[in-house]
Image: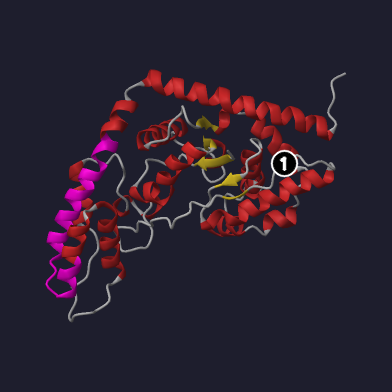
Amino acid sequence: MQTVVSGIRPTGNLHLGNYFGALRNFIKMQQENDCYFFIADYHSLTTHPTPADLHGNVKSVLIDYLAAGLDPQQATLYLQSDVPETAELYLFLNMNAYKGELERVTSFKEKARTQPDNINAGLLTYPTLMAADIIIHKAHKVPVGKDQEQHLEMTRTFANRFNRLYNVDYFPEPEAYNFGEQLIKIPGLDGSTKMGKSEGEGNAIFLNDEPEIIRKKIMKAVTDSGPKHEGEPKSQAIENIFALMKAVSAPETLGYFEAEYQACRIRYGDMKKQLAADVIDFTQPFREKIKEIGSDTTYLSKVVRMGKEKAQASAAKTIREVREIIGFKTF
């Protein structure tokens, strides 16, 4: 059994893109590995240093992930800020991280361009905090998206550099977790290729959206004037509608509308009504679970407390050994 670590940013409620993008695989992953899933509340401060409701965002994400299937009995689910050992390892790694290599990180350059008034030290050293999150548990695998591949490579660099500087074979060099299957990508309702909250509330369908909200969002989804001749390729907006239907609808439903499109008879209004009904049915179990868990503050407290204890036990052992390797000793 290998150790797997993954961070979850507290950026609001989960949507179908999150669920199909990775979360389904997290549920399988926790059954086969020693998993640490943390809610990255420290990380969120790099772009939002004065959050309006940090605790509320953390709570929402915690509830949604539990409702979607993360099991605190199988995996360690904890808050990043509940494990101060992470901050200490972050400090140690920063001592051997260099300004030039941090400034060359693609995500830093992009953030510096888009938020020029908030280029803080946390943003610059984001890769070392991410590395600390991962190697504090001596992880072997990390599930990462395309935008995080460079950060994982830097984590490998920092782990290797620590081993080399102190002449030890202590930290594993973590690798990307291979899910063994292509992840389903859920596009946006606005005709874009990505579903996400940052693209606007109307672009994403959240797991806790009420049926009427889902209907309104889907009926407003961007379409086109329809095919003019058989074999005409679909526009991006129509590809999006079909992709979402493929994820949540029965194969025969998808087949029917595919045939209607190819025959130039498709009525997008009918298709969107069917899609809305199927999305409502698909998300119904999540809505019920979210309401149930969200009202059980005793259970939430227990989950957080249990995760904190398990994560701290792992992190404390690592920090104790790292301090010994570096040379910190008690008089």
Q: Nearer the viewer, residue 197 or 34?
A: 34
Q: Which residue is mark 1?
A: 171
Residue 261 among magenta residues: yes
* Image-quadrant location for residue 273: bottom left
Asked if residue 51 lies left or right of residue 286, the reply is right
Q: Residue at x 43, y 58 (%)?
A: 182
* Image-quadrant location for residue 55: top left
Q: Nearer the viewer, residue 193 or 185?
A: 185
Quadrant of the image containing the C terminus: top right
Number of on-image labels: 1
Image position, residue 172 (x, y; %): 69, 44
Quadrant of the image containing the N terminus: top right
Element type at mark 1 = loop
Q: Main secondary structure of the magenta part?
A: helix
For disc 1, the neighbor class at 10 Å (few under 14, some 14 to 19, many from 20) is many
Q: Residue at x 42, y 40 (%)?
A: 27
Provide the residue span drawn in magenta: 258-287
Image position, residue 51 (x, y; %): 48, 37
Q: Amino acid at mark 1?
A: Phe
- Most extreme residue toward the right is 331
Q: Residue at x 44, y 55 (%)?
A: 181
Q: Nearer the viewer, residue 170 or 67?
A: 170
Q: Nearer the viewer, residue 31 or 68?
A: 31
Asked if residue 230 lies left or right of residue 70, the reply is left
